[in-house]
Amino acid sequence: MSLNCSLWQENSLSVQRFAFARFSELPEQGALLFTLVLLLFLTSLTGNALIALAIWSSPGLHTPMYFFLANLSLLEIGYTCSVTPKMLQSLVSEARGISRKGCATQMFFFTFFAISECCLLAAMAFDRYLAICAPLHYATRMSRGVCVHLAGVSWGVGCLVGLGQTNYIFSLDFCGPCEINHFFCDLPPILALACGDTSHNEAAVFVVAVLCISSPFLLIIASYGRILAAVLVMPSPEGRHKALSTCSSHLLVVTLFYGSGSITYLRPKANHSPGMDKLLALFYTVVTSMLNPIIYSLRNKEVKAALWRVLGRKKL
């Protein structure tokens, strides 16, 4: 498609259509990347759907920990579906364009699912804290109503932040160029196309990143600090091992998700590189979503057994 910016909003001279930059100028590399991303995308969708189905269909897994895990799988499905299909189209097609409304919609859903996942990971850490540090009160403090409330707050915060950030950014005018130096409508590359001074918008993005990425992360660190302190005073080595094993999968998922997200959104603007941003975005939008169900299924006997039942096989 042509990348000239002749499509203007009436009376505001604002670009009405964008185009994603090519990931590579070589067709062979584009085809190879398309195949790799497609395989990762299908693996992610299949794995997360199976995890959610296994938990829903197994009464023995209707506990707070697995309730949150099922929510995490649903968030991962939405997260990858908000970005990957358009990315795949751009990799092998000349139709790399996206309308202003389409771009705003993609940004909203991406932000919605990402922020919701940050909050949900914090809720999962709180659940592990209560299970290990206050086992006698766990059943009452983590009742079904409390679990539903925590999950609802996570989804609700994500929705509010997504609406607020998307509306704030797309209230700006975009003077061009209309090529987005990225493969989806992420906040920093869209802001780079806006007219005039965007320092207030950039500050808002940074503040939201600190509040919605760093704050849940600090809650996770606090929870695991208390967990570690409780585990160290346990008299039984078996008890210490069992307590830590219930947390290991969650800790690994947190490290993958928060690590790539923090590097992308919390490092100084001067250190941003379009190429590095694309690679990081590819990692946290596709790779981590594919790894999460693998991490939980390989390290959890109950989930593994439920998956075998869903697949119609007996546990070996």
Image (cartoon, grey):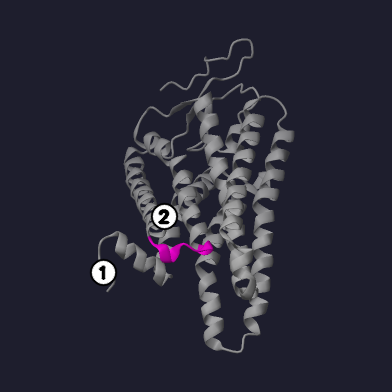
- Residue sitting at x 35%, y 43%: 34
How many residues crowd mark 1 within 10 Å: few (<14), some (14–19), many (20+)?
few
Looking at marks 2 and 1 on the same chain, the residue that comes earlier in the sequence is marked by 2
| Amino acid found under the numbered disc labelled 1 | Lys
For the residues bearing labels 2 and 1, Cβ distance under 8 angstroms: no
Point out the image quarter for the C terminus.
bottom left
- Residue 156, placed above or below residue 298: above
The answer to whether one can see residue 258 in this image is no
Q: Main secondary structure of the magenta part?
A: helix
Residue 97 or residue 242, whichever sits in front: 242
Magenta stretch encompasses residue 265: no
How many residues crowd mark 2 within 10 Å: few (<14), some (14–19), many (20+)?
many
Residue 312 or residue 100, whichever sits in front: 312
Task: Look at mark 1 in the image and give the residue it sits on.
Answer: 314
- Residue 139, placed above or below residue 163: below
Q: Magenta residues?
A: 58-65
Q: Residue furthest left?
A: 313
Q: Position of residue 169 (x, y in %)?
A: 64, 31
- Residue sitting at x 63%, y 33%: 191
| Amino acid found under the numbered disc labelled 2 | Ala
- Relative placement, left or right, of 135 versus 97 is right
- Relative placement, left or right, of 80 versus 168 is left
Q: CA distance from mark 2 to mark 1?
A: 19 Å
- Residue sitting at x 62%, y 34%: 163
- Relative placement, left or right, of 192 versus 299 is right
Residue 52, numbered circle: 2
Point out the image quarter for the N terminus.
top left
Q: Residue furthest top?
A: 11
Q: Secondary structure at mark 1?
A: loop
Q: Residue 309: which quarter of the image?
A: bottom left
